[in-house]
Amino acid sequence: MNAPLGKLRHLILPPRPDPARSRRIAEGRLMICCLLALGIFISIGVRVVGLADANASTHLANSGAAVTAERGRILDRKGRLLAGNLPITILHADPSEIMDISDAAAKLAPLLRDHDQASLTTLLSKKTRYVELDRQLPPKRHAEILKLGIPGVYFAKGATRIYPRDHAAAHILGYVDTDDNGIAGIEKSMNTQLAAGQDVTLSVDLGLQAVMRREIQRQIDSFEAIGGAGILLDIQTGEMLAVTSLPDFNPNKFSLASDDARFNRATKGLYEMGSTFKVLNTAIALESGAATTNQRFEVSKPMRISRFTITDYHPHNEPLNVPEILVYSSNIGSARMAEAIGAQTQRAFMDKLGLLDRLDLELPETSRPLSPARWHRTTTVTVSYGHGISISPAHLASAVAAASGNGHWIQPTLLKRQTGDSPLRLRVFSEQTARAVRSMMRLVVSHDDGTGNYAEARGYMVGGKTGTAEKIKIGGYNKKANLATFVATFPVHDPRYVIVILVDEPKGQKHSHGYATAGWVVAPAIRRIVEQIAPMLGVLPVDEKSPLIRQKLLLDFTIGNKEATLASY
Amino acid sequence: MRLILLCALILVGLGTTLYQVKTGIDERQDRLHSLELRIADTKRDIAILEAEWAYLSRPERIMTLSGDLLKMTPIGQDRILPLDAIPMRIELGPTSIKKIAFTAKQSANKERSDLNNLSASNAHSIRNGIAE
């Protein structure tokens, strides 16, 4: 069999090559096949790795986008939530996909809060691809609408800004528009940080805020006032622990609030503060050397300056010393002291106390005080008892903190100070001046003839000054519209807090014997506030007759020909 | 030839591993995705609960509730004392303890005798009362 084939072979095929050569050829071909296979595997491998990698990176991109969407929260100084985000379901529709508009409107109308059948029909007949039907769909409604099975109706997950404490600190927090951009308060001034997802911690304490708001509201109600404001300031750090402006509003429904309610009286409202300025006048007189504590000023006759006549509420026949001028709240005495101070010095102190400039607070709602461009003799005199210059309650709080604290003016803030923060400090008064001023402020409250007796919270050493000013109307002062102010500092022996409370247009009541003065309207609120907040702030009641307390105060004053000693304290 | 065989084996091995790694990645990605969804859901729940808690713990509400239901009022200043104002326990030596024990015993004895006298006189008066 082999032999004939072997013979035929040479007819078709070339002669058998050398075996060694044929082996080389075979090996060469095998190698080519191998390389080809290897090439295919490698290309498949590269492609697979590439695909896997591409998938992973798209996933990462998605999850990253979800994280950045959340707006930062606003917390109080103890970390309690003041503004946060609430997850909501948004119901929207694509009108072009809805087949039977009237049927869809009839079915949806009873399930939606903001729409009836007619408004839904017009909304769904619009020539757009997106209409929003409900921004805050409760889960139950969500399920019911799903069950209806209307084509072209969609659900989207979203978040809405909420202020769970309702009215608390509304003016500080502010509010956001529908696109979550802050348009008032901290929401506006801190918008960049909040939008980047960072939380903001305020200096405000929710508990103190609530006490303050309730007590001021109570006075507004019982004296039929049109509004009020309150500030609690930490003297050491400049932190504002409570800031209230009444009437206030619910930031969850800010569009329903009136302009009056949205107005922040505590930081934006400008008022002639009246007699509370005598605290500053006294401090300036002592610091500039224009008066010493026992120096006496003539107050028996009304004082005439250009077209003004300055009189006292309770006239005194004999000359008064500096503490008496403050305790009896003598306008004439303050005016005489101001004349001794001089216009330039007074203006320079007002400037140092920040009363001529906009307060640098973390709020868009601040105002530039109204003060005369030229500081005349009349200005000097009227400013001494708080007229002719209009400032905000926040201004007053920070200035009195300097005069009655330790003499430093500290930059006030609405953000919690972090450990290691060094706020801007300016020495305006000496320790000695500040000590004399707060000792006199204590007498206003503790002395029988003082104007602020009702502010006495036993054991907490409250010092203060009342101020009842007639409100400005066009062309003069309105005798019927008062502004009752009280500025308090406590505890006087170790000054830590300043409270400013203002009640706008209180009316005399039967229970106040017709009076609508600060001593009747605001002082009782100060007492109740101090009694409630002192335990919260860790301020312990003290026995003020103890030598340890008495040595921290200046007591060598004479009030009404009697030494201001134990009897009056 | 052996080299080629080895290469082929390695290639097969690599291919299999690659395939398994890839399916493994898919599986893990699915798990990651579901975990992310669960985290997002939990975060939503937390946000809702936090808001609810904040709403329910409004100081105004707590003040009204504690006033109406628990009759709570602000603490008076006469009820607050610093810790140093509370007298601490006096440290006692063994002799003084003995002394205290002795006086305590004495006073106890005295009390007992007082009590006996009292009961005797009581009994007497009662008897008298009955007699009268």
Image (cartoon, rainbow, N blue to C red):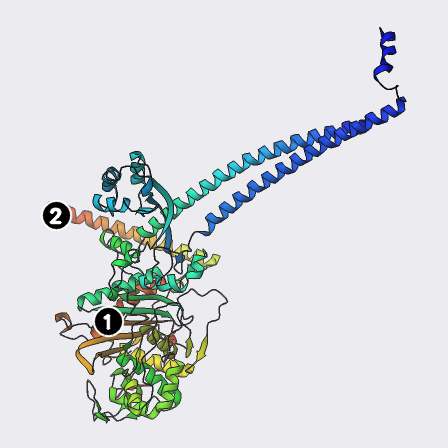
Subunit under mark 2: B
The image position of residue A482, as x and y in percent, is: 20, 76
Whether labels 1 and 2 share one chain: no
Front one among A517 and A532:
A517
Residue in the image at 60% along x and 34% along y: B22
Measured from the top left, where is residue A74 in percent x and y? 39, 58
How many numbered tags mark residues here? 2
Q: Nearer the viewer, residue A102 or A156?
A: A102
User: In the image, A129: left or right of A214?
Assistant: right
How crowded pointer 2 is (Cα within 10 Å; few <14, some 14-19, many 20+) is rated as: few
The residue that label 2 is drawn on is B129
Looking at the image, residue B51 sits to the left or right of residue A332; the answer is: right
Badge 1 sits on which subunit? A
Q: Is residue A567 visible?
A: no
Which type of secondary structure does the marked residue at label 1 adopt? strand
Q: Which residue is mark 1?
A: A503
Q: Kindly give the residue lying farthest to the left in the view shown.
A: B132
Q: CA distance from mark 1 to mark 2?
A: 74 Å
**Secondary structure under the numbered disc 2 in the rendered image:** helix
